[in-house]
Image (cartoon, rainbow, N blue to C red):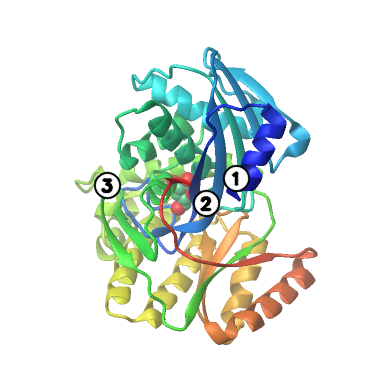
């Protein structure tokens, strides 16, 4: 990959300077969905698929961007003196947002850049291609200009850019999972204080299979912000009867006791998901530690039901993939992953069942939805690196 991207870099930018190359992973969340902005726990892992970059410093303050995934769009030009979000700027709003965020945090970027990207994460699939680009940009700025930031700082700056430059009120999960990724490990992160622990995912005789619905998210971002504000409304009303700072502080029994304080039924369901999902995540990590993968799988299934019925972020495409997976022999657990509204599901499938899984779920999906899903058997990889 490195050779291809450097070759294309030279063709497109004609640059002969010191071209450096980087990689940042995508991520998949195993359990703990829509809990990260509710002070709960998440359990994601970085993947070995992600975004590759080639980059070279410039003498001036110009920024030139090119994506090998969108060759038809050509070179997009901007400047360090014009770091504003623009609809027509497409994906370049992500690296620009991170540069803007570094400047906001007091790091002055000394010169412009030529930046070429190539991603092998399916776009808009819920595997965090955008957070991958954000963390990559932060990592590049750190390496090129010696900025004194940790990987965790890069995650926080990426989230800051997403929230304040790109207008998506996301939590910290994606950027954190990507920046802090560790081969063969998931990250058990408490989003209330960012304490975390690595948990080895050594699946004996099973694989992680991602099924991509190929339904683009579209309205997803506005729906995402809507879910977040419904949770905030529920929390404000719960606070009138119980002393909490976030939904993540409640367990199921406490939620059931206090839930009548939440006036709108829809907000009660949203909050119920956030509370129960957080507790499921704690139980899932316990199950994994006890080597009980079957129980982990059952909790994944319960997570999907809650995201479908109470949080309402699945839709017919994700439900079809998951419900077909549940019917398939050798599937330990299956659920949607990421924000929802399209995107991907994650399944744990026994080795010998993977081929049949892809055939069966793929066939049923095409029949019901009318177009193909894509399947990826994935490995858990490290965070960003220079390659
Ligand atoms: C998106 C957001 C994350 C998280 C998930 C849902 O991926 O970026 O912060 O909220 O949705 O769990």
* Disc number lying in front (3 or 2): 3
Q: Secondary structure at mark 1?
A: helix
Q: Nearer the viewer, residue 173 or 379?
A: 379
Separation of disc 3 and disc 2 at Cα? 20 Å
Q: What residue does disc 2 label?
A: 339
Q: What residue does disc 3 label?
A: 194
Above or below, comparing residue 174 to residue 13 in the picture: below
User: In the displayed structure, does residue 287 sit left or right of residue 170?
Assistant: left
Which percent across, then down, holds residue 150? Answer: 30, 38
Q: What residue does disc 1 label?
A: 220
Q: Are marks 1 and 3 in contact (CB under 8 Å)?
A: no
Above or below, comparing residue 346 to residue 73 in the picture: below
Q: Secondary structure at mark 3?
A: loop
Which percent across, then down, holds residue 223? Answer: 56, 43
Q: Ligand 1 closer than 8 Å to the CB at disc 2?
A: yes
Q: Residue at x 58, y 85 (%)?
A: 353
Please tell me how many numbered marks the rendered image carries.
Answer: 3
Q: Residue at x 66, y 61 (%)?
A: 213
User: In the displayed structure, does residue 331 sit left or right of residue 231?
Assistant: right
Which percent across, then down, holds residue 115? Answer: 58, 31
Q: Residues within 10 Å of mark 1 (few under 14, many from 20)?
A: some
User: In the displayed structure, does residue 198 sit left or right of residue 91?
Assistant: left
Tell me which numbered mark, 1 or 2, is placed earlier along the sequence.
1
Q: Residues within 10 Å of mark 2 (few under 14, many from 20)?
A: many
Q: Ligand 1 closer than 8 Å to the CB at disc 1?
A: no
Above or below, comparing residue 166 to residue 233 in the picture: above
Which percent across, then down, holds residue 364? Answer: 73, 75
Q: Are marks 1 and 2 in contact (CB under 8 Å)?
A: yes
Let me know if residue 26 appears in the view. yes
């Amino acid at each position: 990959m490195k050779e291809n991207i450097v070759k294309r870099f030279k063709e497109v930018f004609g640059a002969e300077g010191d071209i450096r190359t980087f990689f940042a992973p995508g991520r998949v969340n195993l359990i703990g969905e829509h809990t990260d902005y509710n002070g709960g726990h998440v359990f994601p892992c970085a993947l070995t698929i992600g975004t590759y970059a080639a980059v070279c410093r410039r003498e001036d303050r110009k920024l030139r961007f090119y994506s090998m995934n969108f060759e038809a769009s050509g070179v997009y030009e901007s400047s360090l003196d014009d770091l504003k979000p623009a609809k027509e700027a497409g994906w370049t709003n992500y690296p620009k947002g991170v540069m803007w965020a570094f400047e906001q945090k007091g790091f002055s970027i000394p010169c412009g850049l030529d930046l070429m990207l190539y991603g092998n994460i399916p776009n808009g699939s819920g595997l965090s291609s955008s957070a991958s680009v954000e963390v990559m940009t932060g990592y590049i700025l750190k390496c090129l200009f010696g900025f004194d930031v940790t990987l965790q700082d890069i995650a926080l700056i990426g989230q800051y850019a997403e929230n304040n430059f790109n207008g998506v009120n996301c939590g910290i999960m994606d950027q954190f999972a990507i920046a802090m990724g560790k081969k063969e490990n998931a990250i058990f992160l408490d989003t209330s204080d960012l304490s975390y622990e690595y948990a080895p995912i050594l699946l004996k005789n099973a694989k992680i299979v991602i099924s991509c619905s190929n339904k683009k998210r579209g309205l997803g971002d506005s729906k995402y912000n809507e879910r977040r504000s419904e949770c905030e409304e529920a929390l404000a009303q719960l606070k009138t009867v119980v002393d909490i700072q976030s939904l993540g502080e409640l367990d199921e029994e406490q939620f059931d006791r206090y839930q009548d304080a939440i006036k709108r039924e829809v907000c009660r369901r949203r909050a119920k998901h956030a509370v129960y999902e957080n507790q499921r995540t704690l139980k899932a990590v316990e199950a994994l530690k006890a080597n009980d993968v079957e129980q982990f799988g059952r909790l994944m299934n319960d997570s999907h039901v809650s995201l479908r019925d109470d949080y309402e972020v699945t839709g017919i495409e994700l439900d079809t993939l998951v419900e077909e997976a549940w019917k398939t022999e050798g599937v330990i657990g299956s659920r949607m992953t990421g924000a929802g509204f399209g995107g991907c599901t994650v399944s744990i499938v026994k080795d010998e069942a993977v081929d049949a899984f892809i055939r069966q779920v793929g066939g049923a999906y095409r029949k019901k939805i009318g177009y193909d899903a894509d399947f990826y058997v994935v490995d858990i990889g490290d965070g960003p690196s220079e390659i």
